[in-house]
Structures are given as C-alpha cells and as structure tokens.
Amino acid sequence: MENQLVITVKDLLLFILWGSLVTLFVYLILVVRRVLLIVKQVNQVVDGNRQNIDATLDIVPELSKHIEVITGEVAHDVQAFRTTIDNIAGTTESITETVKENQGFVDGLSSFMHTFSIGKALYDKYFGSKIKDFKVTVAEVKKEMDDESSETKDTL
C-alpha cells in the first residue's frame, strides 16, 4: 500500500486564502477590542467631567448672544470709522495734489534749508571755537566782577 499525498496549486491557494482570512479576522478582533477600550475610557472621562461639561453647555448660549452683540457693535463702529477713513483718504489726496502743485516752492525751500545747513556747518567750523572761547572769557570776567563786588561790599 502506497500512501501518496497530492497537493494541487488550487489547494495551496485555498489554504493561503483561508489562512489570510483567519489572520485578518484575528486582526479585526484586536482592532475592535482596542476601539472598545478607547470608547470605555472616553465614557469614563465624560462621566468624570459631567458637571463641567453641563456648565459649559449652559454658558455657550449666553456666549453666542454676547458675541452677536459685540459683532453688532464692532460692525457699527467700523461703519462709523469707514467715513472717517474716506475723509482722511480725500484729505490725503488733496494734500498730495497741493504738494505736487507747489513742488517748485518745496524744492526751493529744500534748497534754502540745505544751503543754510552748509552755512551753519561752515560757521561752526571757523567761528565755533572762537565763540566758545569768548563765552569762557565772558564767564571768567563775570566771575571776577562778582568777586570784586562781594569784596567791596565786605569792606563797606
């Protein structure tokens, strides 16, 4: 008697398919178990904080009313401010046009100020130290005069 075991490709593929399905079901069971543990923990957290959650849910409608009031006030203020911005923009355009029209005068004034600053720099360079010496001399003379006047008062 000969015992032969014949395995066909079809049998091998069916074995692999059933093994894969069993592995997939085991994995799904582990995933479902993990999800159930997470849901249980979430329920515990919700139960532990039930009072805080209820208090928050009670406050939310009031907050939404306050937000609506604040939004209305801000919209009103923005609307009022918009006219001010429009006025400022118009005034700025007017000033810009005036400056453009008077550009020659502004250029002349700028040139004069530049020339004046050069003149002041030259004056300070050549006469600044002399004026400083003159001020020191005046201060010394004043001090001497004050000293002499106090001496004459003491002698009288």
Image: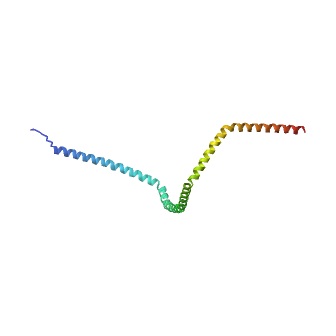
Asked whether, in this view, residue 20 is left or right of residue 108, the answer is: left
Residue 39 locus on image (x, y percent): 39, 52
How many labels, in total? 0
Residue 2 versus residue 53 in the image, above or below: above
Location of the C terminus by quadrant is top right
Instruction: From the viewer's perspective, tell me whether residue 68 is left or right of residue 12.
Output: right
Residue 13: horizontal and vertical position, in percent? Answer: 19, 45
- Looking at this view, is 120 or 9 the one in front? 120
Quadrant of residue 126 in the image? Answer: top right
Q: Which residue is drawn at 64% across and 40% down?
A: 121
Q: Which residue is drawn at 16% across and 43% down?
A: 9
Residue shown at the point (86%, 37%) measured from the top left: 151
Q: Would residue 27 be found to the left or right of residue 108 on screen?
A: left
Q: Residue at x 33, y 48 (%)?
A: 31
Extreme left residue here?
1
Going by the picture, which residue comes out furthest to the right? 156
> Could you tell me residue 38's position as x and y percent?
39, 50
- For the rendered model, the colour scheme is rainbow
Of the 4 image quadrants, the one containing the N terminus is: top left
Q: Could you say where residue 68 lies in the image, as x and y percent from the top left?
A: 50, 62
